Image (cartoon, coloured by chain):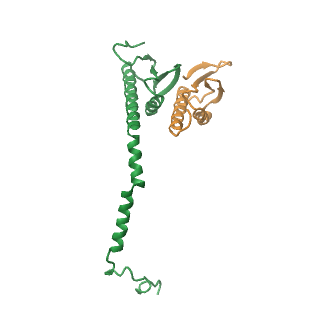
Chain colours: A orange, B green
Amino acid sequence: MAEAQTGSDGAPCTTVTFDRSLYSEAGVLAAVAVFDGFATVTVTEAESGWTVRLEEPDPRYADVLGDELANYALAESVSQQRAGGAA
Amino acid sequence: MSADADDLELGYDLGARTVSFDLNEELYSKEAVYGAAYLFLDRVYVFLTRTGDAQTRVRLRAKGEATESDLEALAGEFANELLNQMVRRQVSDATSQIREYTLARAFFGNEGRASIDSLLAELDAEDLDDDPLEIEVPWERSGQGTVGG
């Protein structure tokens, strides 16, 4: 879920955590690649999945960036699952 | 805020522009959840999380302002679409053998070959002696095939 947080420097940031059993890695990374230009994006991988951190977002899209990224990752994951890839 | 389970079979939580509910994967397959979620992506923000071994939490967040009744309707529509996806899957599974048989018969069955053979025989037997449009006469020999002369 996209959660608005405050970074260590006090600047606002958003984190989105994707569960490995529901989202594919390729889907998450595709979303990160697409939204990389709208914020400083870092991905942290854990056993349960991936956490995407969005910092210094483009102010025009800051409110929706996490949700849009999550939608994109889900769409990609579903498409890949339908194409026969592992999700 | 939670709805009374007696009033609505799908229990859900309402938040700011958000409705969330848990789905039991023993009842709703992951494919059905994916199918329904995919159809809602253009209308709402969809997020899936794992809340248990066989439980998926679906969170739908409206892209604009939404009242409680809007969100309740959204949850209901999603639940309906889940059932739709389940039924589609069941029908697909139940008729897969029929589809495979029909395709196999269309491509490899004797009837198809016989019909092609009969068409070829029909062409062979056709009387091609009459050629009122002189289609069989080569273009050059007909005297119309010269260019620029």
* B145 over A76 or under it: above or below: below
Give residue B95's quadrant in the image: top left
Of residues B69 and A17, the one nearer the viewer is A17
Residue ranking furthest to the front:
B110
Give residue A7's quadrant in the image: top right
Question: B12 left or right of A6?
Answer: left
* B149 over A60 or under it: above or below: below
Q: Position of residue B129 (x, y in %)?
A: 33, 81
Residue pictured at 66% horizontal, 26% vertical = A44
The image quadrant where one finds the N terminus of chain B is top left
Q: Position of residue B107 (x, y in %)?
A: 42, 54
Q: Position of residue A62 (x, y in %)?
A: 56, 27
Decide if residue B43 is in sight here: no
Residue pictured at 38% horizontal, 63% vertical = B116
Of residues A44 and B54, the one nearer the viewer is B54
Decide if residue B145 is in sight here: yes
Residue pictured at 43% horizontal, 82% vertical = B139
Residue pictured at 36% horizontal, 61% vertical = B114
